[in-house]
Amino acid sequence: MGELEGKIAIVTGAAKGFGLASTKAFIDEGAKVVMTDVDDTEGQKQAEQFGDKAIFIKQDVSDEASWPEVFKKAEETFGPVNVLLNNAGILLFDNAEDVKMEDFHKILSVDLDGVMLG
């Protein structure tokens, strides 16, 4: 029996990278996982490899209205959520003097607001 046997997890930013690796680790430890990401094509593709142990929901974590639906779908599919890995994040590689305020606010919206909303 794994450390997360019977647990239900939500992993944001789960279409690739750390989020996808965490999803795999959670499932290996017995959890069922709701994967979210803005990349619905890659997210859906990755979720399919886990069969009935994972589902994918397209989500922008900075959108406050998206959170209740993610939790509702998680509970309808698997049951009450026990774990949230609020992993989604974005960054920008540029010189500080070249960063547009619009881009800076988007980073803050995802990286800070998304965590608070979760």
Image (cartoon, rainbow, N blue to C red):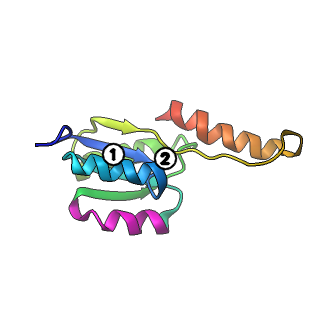
Is 97 on the left-hand or right-hand side of 92?
right
Along the line of sight, which residue is nearer the eye, 32 or 61? 32
> Which amino acid does the dot numbered 1 rest on?
Lys
Residue plotted at (38% across, 65% down): 46
- Image x and y of residue 95, in percent: 84, 44
- Image x and y of residue 67, in percent: 45, 42
Is 23 on the left-hand or right-hand side of 59?
left
Q: Looking at the image, do the residues carrying marks 1 and 2 touch, with CB atoms under 8 Å apart? A: no
- Image x and y of residue 68, in percent: 41, 42
Name the secondary structure under disc 2. Answer: helix
Furthest residue in direction right, as rendered: 97
Is 98 on the left-hand or right-hand side of 8?
right
Name the secondary structure under disc 1. Answer: helix
Q: Earlier in the sequence, mark 1 or mark 2?
A: 2
Residue plotted at (88% across, 46% down): 98
Queried whether the magenta region covers residue 105, the answer comes back as no
- Locate the N terminus by quadrant: top left
Residue plotted at (62% across, 47% down): 90
Residue hosting label 2 = 66
Q: Which residues are magenta?
A: 41-52
Residue hosting label 1 = 72
> Which amino acid does the dot numbered 2 rest on?
Ser
Queried whether the magenta region covers residue 51, the answer comes back as yes
The secondary structure that dominates the magenta segment is helix
